[in-house]
Image (spheres, helix red, strand yellow):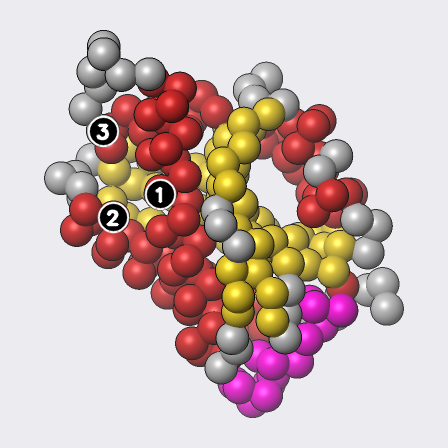
Amino acid sequence: MDKIDISHQQIEAIKELCNIGVGKGASVLNTMLSCHINLSVPNVRIISSKDFKDDLRLFAKDSSISSVSLGFEGKISGSAQLLFPTETASSLVAVLVDENDDLDMDALRAGTFCEVGNIVLNGVMGSISNMLDLTFNYSVPEYIETDPENFINKPSANQQDSHVLLARTRFTIDELDIDGDIALFMQIGAIHTLIETIEKKFGF
């Protein structure tokens, strides 16, 4: 099977699962931090890894990519990733933490972004798990900063039979809109299993 057939209703169901998940992530972040954070997922697509590579080049433009990766295994296995151009990730971190000249800003950015990514990705995967009665085992989240071409050539993004569930995510912090991507890398069989599970759960 090399084709993904998915209805508008199924896409909307996935979008709702992602929105519930990032909403939970935003609630956790709001509790941890002094600023109000609103997260939403205005757009969800399922695309091939090839199309994702083209999308990522446009998304990153001249910037490197900052990513938090969370591997998961179960009835559906893959890798969930929160992606930002590094310049945007730095802007996000700057409004979340108090900068201090005594701190290593690279290490601070990596640590803070990894924590944010872990919270958001756990919210999304937790929502999928709870709503679809699925159980996942997770790997330790990993922070990566690299240029788009190196990221594209990572195994998770470079498998010929893999597809990407791409959820465009908007962080709104004190009226500052910051866009990132949540990408769920799954082989085509896992995508079909996800769609079949949604069909059974929601009746379409």
Earlier in the chain: of badge 3 and badge 2, it is: 2
Image coordinates of residue 18 in percent, x first then y, are 45, 61
Image coordinates of residue 106 in percent, x first then y, are 40, 19
Q: Secondary structure at mark 3?
A: loop
In which quadrant of the rendered view does residue 150 lie?
A: top right
Residue drawn at (49%, 36%) of the image: 143
Query: Distance from label 1 to label 3 (Cα)?
Result: 12 Å
Q: Are marks 2 and 1 in contact (CB under 8 Å)?
A: yes
Q: Which residue is mark 2?
A: 29
Q: Are marks 3 and 2 in contact (CB under 8 Å)?
A: no
In which quadrant of the rendered view does residue 5 lie?
A: bottom right
Earlier in the chain: of badge 2 and badge 1, it is: 2
Residue drawn at (19%, 46%) of the image: 32
Residue type at mark 3: give it: Val
Magenta residues, as a range? Answer: 189-204
Residue drawn at (48%, 70%) of the image: 128
**In screen coordinates, is 177 left or right of 95?**
right
In terms of depth relative to the viewer, which is nearer, 87 or 75? Answer: 75
Instruction: Look at the picture and state if 93 lies above or below 102.
Output: below
Q: Which residue is mark 1?
A: 116
Residue 197 appearing in the image: yes
Q: Main secondary structure of the magenta part?
A: helix
